[in-house]
Amino acid sequence: MSSLSSMTWDPATASPVTPDRPVVVVGGGPVGMTAAATLAAEGLPVVLVEQSPQPRPDWRASTFHAATLELLDTIGITERMHAEGLVVPTYQFRDRRDGLIAEFDFRLLADETRFPYRLQLNQQQLVRFLAERLHGDQRVRLHFGSRLTGLAITADGVRLTVEGPAGESDLLASYVVGADGPRSTVRGALDVPFEGFTYPERFAITSTPVDLQALLPGLGHVNYVADPQEWLFILRTPESWRVVWPVPPEMSAEEAGSAARLQRQLQRVARTSRATR
Ligand SMILES: Cc1cc2nc3c(=O)[nH]c(=O)nc-3n(C[C@H](O)[C@H](O)[C@H](O)COP(=O)(O)OP(=O)(O)OC[C@H]3O[C@@H](n4cnc5c(N)ncnc54)[C@H](O)[C@@H]3O)c2cc1C
């Protein structure tokens, strides 16, 4: 990777954003896609560089709260999110043995926000909606399958080195938005420190098409379940139910994610008649 150029960039003399020197957004996750859509909505030419050949389909976050929906509403994407998402106005705190402890109702916030609920929608769907939206925008060029490898600040902007399907090439930008995740190449190239620590706890996230509400009457669509041995988090997404539990420190990732263990764990949450031991 090229190191940060010693030349200092001066915003007062920097060239303006033009199609030849667009804003380059590195990273096509939810943050990069939203940044690109927001900049394009302001009329700016944008290039988005994403190493994955298409919007990433990974199962990750599954919930949107009011503040995020308000932000996404400014780029006109929430209608589509609501068409495919699940509106959940309440959530529960439960005890694994004793059942419901308390239920909270977001509708009490109706005077505060237009979105007094959680919207359950898997993160990859938002990324897909945004990619489709950006594809149709003439101000935006999408470079999927293109990985940023180097970046240097010049007198009038930024020169990025990108490895794409046709090999290595340079891109000139007036501004760069680094939205390339926790191991950001942009941050590394700029020597920007990233202080903090990694929590030692690990969790297993499992999805099942089995209707847990039918097996556990009274279960809400979003449930935080307390237990002295093994707490749980159970929530509904449009595609499936999702169950999250802690992984014991001594257990290997292979064992924690093995089909047999996941099935055993799920059966302890809600037993199906077809269950095998
Ligand atoms: C299993 C799981 C469950 C999660 N659940 C939740 C949840 O319930 N709630 C919640 O709030 N958050 C959750 N998260 C966290 C959430 O997914 C992240 O906070 C979110 O993805 C961050 O978005 P981002 O756009 O900043 O980064 P990312 O989604 O990581 O996107 C960064 C993008 O940059 C691309 N990229 C990286 N390096 C380069 C490069 N050199 N060149 C070009 N492209 C590059 C990557 O391919 C990627 O597409 C979860 C994460 C995981 C893994």
Image (tube, rainbow, N blue to C red):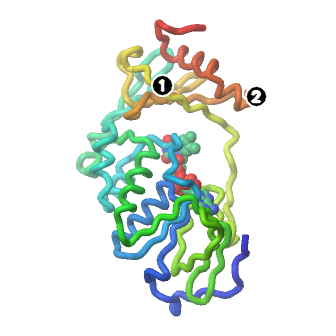
Q: Position of residue 67 (x, y in %)?
A: 37, 53
Eyeballing the image, is 17 above or below 66?
A: below
Eyeballing the image, is 33 above or below 56?
A: below
Q: Position of residue 227 (x, y in %)?
A: 56, 22
The secondary structure type at the circle numbered 1 is strand
Q: Which residue is mark 1?
A: 208
Residue at image location 44% in from the left, 24% down from the top: 209
Residue 250's tag is: 2
Q: Are marks 1 and 2 in contact (CB under 8 Å)?
A: no
Amino acid of disc 2 = Glu
Residue at image location 51% in from the left, 91% down from the top: 12
Q: With 195 as the anchor, is 69 left or right in this view?
A: left
Of all residues, the one furthest to the front in this rendering is: 166
Q: Position of residue 252 (x, y in %)?
A: 74, 29
Q: Name the quadrant containing residue 5.
A: bottom right
Mark 1: few/some/many CA within 10 Å (<14, 14-19, 20+)? some
Q: With 209 as the anchor, is 268 left or right in this view?
A: right
Residue at image location 59% in from the left, 22% down from the top: 262
